[in-house]
Image: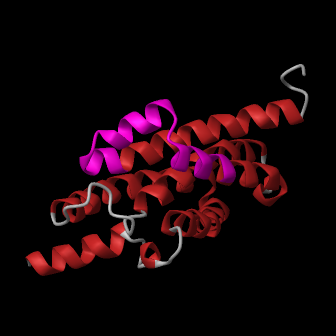
Amino acid sequence: MKRSVHIWARLISTVGGLGYLKPAPGTWASAASLPLAWALHVWGGFPLLAAGTLLAIGLGYWATAVMVSADRLKDPPEIVIDELAGQWLALWSISLPAWLHGIEITVLWPGWVSAFVLFRLFDIWKPGPVGWADRSGGALGVMLDDLIAGLIAGLGTVLLAGIAHGVMGL
């Protein structure tokens, strides 16, 4: 039983093995999360992407807790479920308005680019609360830093869209 738990935890935490891609496994996982997010949005709109994100957070926390307890590294590089969850959270900033207004989500391609670039920037740079969460350690720290980075990236994407569309009065 314990071995099967570890196998499932490894499969989930590495997003099916994506975490073993080199270099930059987090960037690979973030990039792979984009077509998955698109598919979830196309199949069920924002509600399905939101549900998928919450499921990734829950399963990710469990799998990360199993993996971190079995590993002496604070945040093993192969654990990338946190990148998938954080990237999906950043993409809420385009999925929700697309769903609410009946807009084809691929038309919002600049938002895809900014959500991806901002998420990777905040995840790597770890400003303010992202760094605090990262330093807190354990499964919560592993997951939380990427979720905060995703939230900030999503807000940044909304801000950039507002500027680009003249909504911000600039």
Rendered residue at 46%/38% (across/down): 130
The one nearer the camera, 116 or 162, is: 116
> Where is 66 relative to 147, above or below?
below
> Does residue 137 appear in this view?
yes
42 lies left or right of 109:
left
Residue 74 lies, in percent from the top left, at 27, 54
- Magenta-tinted stretch: 117-142
Hey, which quadrant is residue 9 in on the image? bottom left
129 is within the stretch colored magenta: yes
> Where is 159 relative to 79, above or below?
above
> Does residue 103 appear in this view?
no
Quadrant assignment for the N terminus:
bottom left
Hey, which quadrant is residue 97 in on the image? top right
Residue sticking out furthest to the top: 169
The one nearer the camera, 142 or 86, is: 142
Residue 11 lies, in percent from the top left, at 33, 76
Residue sticking out furthest to the left: 1
For the stretch drawn in magenta, the main secondary structure is helix
Rendered residue at 64%/69% (across/down): 35
Residue 84 lies, in percent from the top left, at 49, 60
Rendered residue at 43%/64% (across/down): 80
120 is within the stretch colored magenta: yes
60 lies left or right of 148:
left
Residue 59 lies, in percent from the top left, at 32, 59
The one nearer the camera, 121 or 151, is: 121
Hey, which quadrant is residue 167 in on the image? top right
Quadrant assignment for the C terminus:
top right
97 lies left or right of 125:
right
> Where is 37 relative to 141, above or below?
below
